[in-house]
Amino acid sequence: MFIAYVVVASLLALALIGSGRAKLVRDEKVTEGMHKIGVPDSWFPRLSALEFAGALGLIAGIFYRPLGIAASAGIILYFIGAIATHLRAKDTKGLPMPAVLMAVAAAPLLFGIATV
């Protein structure tokens, strides 16, 4: 289970870093999609910081598992918020990405719990 945690946590951390970076540098594709669902520009740095913190927590969880478990739980909550925002805006096209990432975030949580 440890190896499974490391692999999934590392891949999810890379995805979170990429997503956080896109928000931070105001990538046109990301900005357009987020404005469409009503996310103001002032939230972009905060959302980026949450994604970076989640990625850092997952990586730190390799060495201290409770931190990785907490980070996974936080990432799941983050993506529940993203899904709720898409649903509130009636944006079904934007739902698959946060839903998949939320499901992937459950894996390190489960693997982390299994190896404590």
Image (cartoon, rainbow, N blue to C red):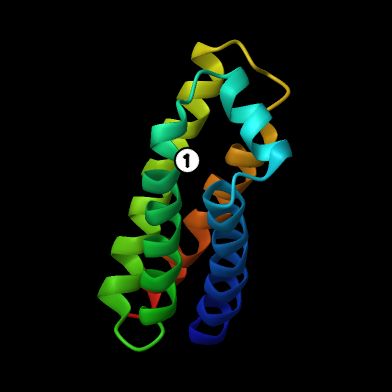
As drawn, 114 above or below 24: below
Of residue 30 and residue 60, the one placed in the foreground of this image is: 30
Of residue 100 and residue 91, the one placed in the foreground of this image is: 91
Q: Give the side of residue 65 with respect to residue 81, left or right.
A: left
Residue type at mark 1: give it: Phe
Quadrant assignment, res 53? bottom left
As drawn, 103 above or below 71: above
Residue at left offset 35%, top offset 89% = 63
Confirm whether residue 84 shows in the render.
yes
Residue at left offset 46%, top offset 23% = 84
Confirm whether residue 95 shows in the render.
no
Quadrant assignment, res 58? bottom left
As drawn, 47 above or below 42: below
Residue at left offset 68%, top offset 19% = 92
Q: Which residue is mark 1?
A: 79
The x and y percentages for residue 98 are 59, 39
Of residue 42 and residue 115, the one placed in the foreground of this image is: 42
Residue at left offset 29%, top offset 84% = 64
The x and y percentages for residue 3 are 56, 86
The x and y percentages for residue 69 are 33, 66
The image quadrant where one finds the C terminus is: bottom left
Dot 1: element = helix
